[in-house]
Image (cartoon, rainbow, N blue to C red):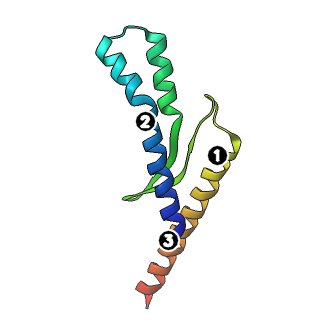
Amino acid sequence: MQEIRSVVAGMRDLECRAVQAYQPIVADILRTRSRDTRHIEQTLDGLLGFCGYLSKIGDVIHVLHCFEKDSRKTDKRDLRVAKERLSIVRKRINEEKKDAKRLRTY
């Protein structure tokens, strides 16, 4: 449970930093009705740099990892963390299904 709280807190922090960093820039683009596609593209790339990996399994969305990107390429460590956590989630779900099936057979 503590790990879940930690991930949620990390995502909230990431969201706050993204808003603080990009709200003035986006407001300026909208206020000036900028048509500078390069500037708009760079702003969108920056916003996408605050990201997280999510997985929807059934009716549940699992937050696997969240981080702030330093470049357009995603670091291998971040991908590995997300994949490992997805594996753990899938394993837990399979175990829960097996347990539920065993309970039904009794």
Q: Which residue is mark 2?
A: 20
Residue at 47 percent across and 18 percent down: it is: 41
Image coordinates for residue 104, horizontal then vertical, percent: 41, 84
Residue count near mark 1 (Cα–Cα under 10 Å), binned few <14, some 14–19, many ≥20: some
Image coordinates for residue 72, horizontal then vertical, percent: 61, 28
Q: Is residue 78 above or below residue 91?
A: above
Dot 3 amino acid type: Met
Left or right: residue 77 compared with residue 49: right
Q: Which residue is mark 3?
A: 1
For the view shown, which residue lies furthest in the bottom direction?
106
Label 2, secondary structure: give it.
helix
Real-space Cα separation, disc 2 to disc 1, in angstroms: 23 Å
- Upstream in sequence: badge 2 or badge 3: 3
Image coordinates for residue 73, horizontal then vertical, percent: 64, 31
Dot 2 amino acid type: Gln
Left or right: residue 54 compared with residue 60: right
Residue at 59 percent across and 36 percent down: it is: 69
Left or right: residue 80 compared with residue 106: right
Residue closer to the observer: 97 or 61: 61
Real-space Cα separation, disc 2 to disc 3, in angstroms: 29 Å
Q: Which mark is residue 46?
A: none
Label 3, secondary structure: give it.
loop
Dot 1 amino acid type: Asp
- Upstream in sequence: badge 2 or badge 1: 2
Image coordinates for residue 46, horizontal then vertical, percent: 51, 28
Q: Nearer the viewer, mark 2 or mark 1?
A: 2
Real-space Cα separation, disc 3 to disc 1, in angstroms: 21 Å
Q: Which residue is mark 1?
A: 78
Left or right: residue 24 compared with residue 51: left
